[in-house]
């Protein structure tokens, strides 16, 4: 992946990298130089943003039986 540096020295972090690091708007990151001279981006926020699917997770409680659902879809009374 590559990106272009703007005249202000800014870059857009590719979405795949943001998702992998769990960073989003307002996240703080640090740039660190490692032993081989390369630079790595390290997220400083301890908590990753909640997954867009997290609020959909859960456990269904007691609901309709299969027979009740089938009767409803058939229009039975």
Image (cartoon, rainbow, N blue to C red):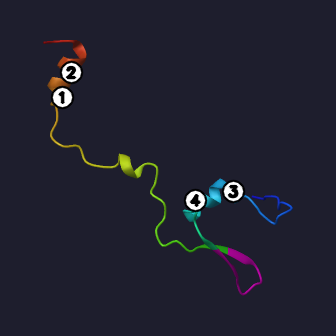
The residue tagged with tag 2: helix, strand or loop?
helix
The residue tagged with tag 1: helix, strand or loop?
helix
Q: Nearer the viewer, residue 59 or 31?
A: 31
Q: Please tell me which residue is depicted at 48% across the width and 64% down the height of the picture.
A: 48
57 up-or-down from 27: above or below: above
The residue beneath circle 2 is 70
Q: Would residue 35 be counted in the magenta stretch?
A: yes
42 up-or-down from 3: above or below: below
Q: CA distance from mark 4 to mark 2?
A: 44 Å
Q: Earlier in the sequence, mark 4 or mark 2?
A: 4
The residue beneath circle 1 is 66
Disc 1 packing (10 Å; few <14; some 14–19; many ≥20):
few
Q: CA distance from mark 1 to mark 4?
A: 42 Å
Q: CA distance from mark 2 to mark 3?
A: 46 Å
Q: Which residues are magenta?
A: 30-40
Asked if the residue under mark 4 is in contact with the one under mark 3, i.e. CB atoms within 8 Å, the reply is no
The residue beneath circle 4 is 24
Q: Would residue 16 be counted in the magenta stretch?
A: no
Q: Please tell me which residue is depicted at 34% across the width and 49% down the height of the picture.
A: 57
Q: Quadrant of residue 30?
A: bottom right
Q: Is residue 18 left or right of residue 6?
A: left
The residue tagged with tag 4: helix, strand or loop?
loop
4 up-or-down from 63: above or below: below
Asked if the residue under mark 3 is in contact with the one under mark 2, i.e. CB atoms within 8 Å, the reply is no
- Residue closest to the far left: 77
Q: Nearer the viewer, mark 4 or mark 2?
A: 4
């Amino acid at each position: 992946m590559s990106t272009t540096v703007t005249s202000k020295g800014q870059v857009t972090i590719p979405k795949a990298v943001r998702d992998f690091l769990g960073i989003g708007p307002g996240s703080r990151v640090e740039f660190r130089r490692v032993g081989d001279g390369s630079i790595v981006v390290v997220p400083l926020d301890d908590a990753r943003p909640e997954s867009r699917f997290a609020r959909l997770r859960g456990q269904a409680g007691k609901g309709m039986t299969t027979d009740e659902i089938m009767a409803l879809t058939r229009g039975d009374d």
